[in-house]
Amino acid sequence: MTTDNLNSVQVGDALPPTVFGPVTRGMLALYAGASGDHNPIHIDSDYAKKAGLPDVFAQGMLSFGGLGQVVTKWAGLDRLRSFGARFVSMTQVHDVISCTGTVAERFEAEGEVRLRINVLAQTQDGRQTLVGEAVVAVG
């Protein structure tokens, strides 16, 4: 779907997914450098194990970025009006993350037709890691 076609979007329509991974320790280290999130729980296996975890886990914002891509690649960054998600479980090393979106509502606000989109990041085994919503302007 291109941004020219947003007028024909219906509730229930799915956005093209974004998939990334498998998550690697190297990916987490690179993301730590790019994001400035150097919390050792994400990059130091010994530290994570001392904290009672089996291994390091991904920074939540790594998957949040994947969710953002689902929405902005589909609608365009200029149409984004709001975006938020909550973290519901950890993304582990070796997980493959699928980020999806589904149109949940069509409504008017501030003189614009808008779409509310439910977004979800989940692992290869169906475990949800982030859930949220985005609002985009139709035109």
Image (cartoon, helix red, strand yellow):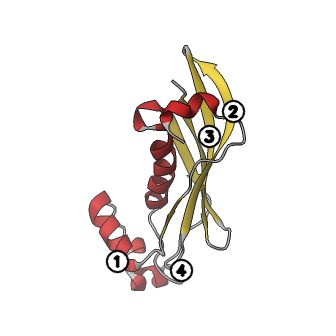
Dot 4 or dot 2: first in sequence order is: 4
Q: Residue furthest right?
A: 12
- Residue ID at (53%, 80%): 53
Q: Between tags 4 and 2, which lies in front?
A: 2
| Vertical order, 4 against 61 (above or below) | above
The three-letter amino acid code for the residue at tag 2 is Glu
Q: Between tags 4 and 3, which lies in front?
A: 3
Q: Between tags 3 and 1, which lies in front?
A: 3
The three-letter amino acid code for the residue at tag 1 is Gly
Q: Can you identify the residue that label 3 sits on? A: 117
The three-letter amino acid code for the residue at tag 3 is Ile
Q: CA distance from mark 2 to mark 3?
A: 7 Å
The three-letter amino acid code for the residue at tag 4 is Leu
Q: Can you identify the residue that label 2 sits on? A: 105
Q: Can you identify the residue that label 1 sits on? A: 26
Dot 1 or dot 4: first in sequence order is: 1
Q: Can you identify the residue that label 4 sits on? A: 53
Q: CA distance from mark 4 to mark 3?
A: 33 Å
Dot 4 or dot 3: first in sequence order is: 4
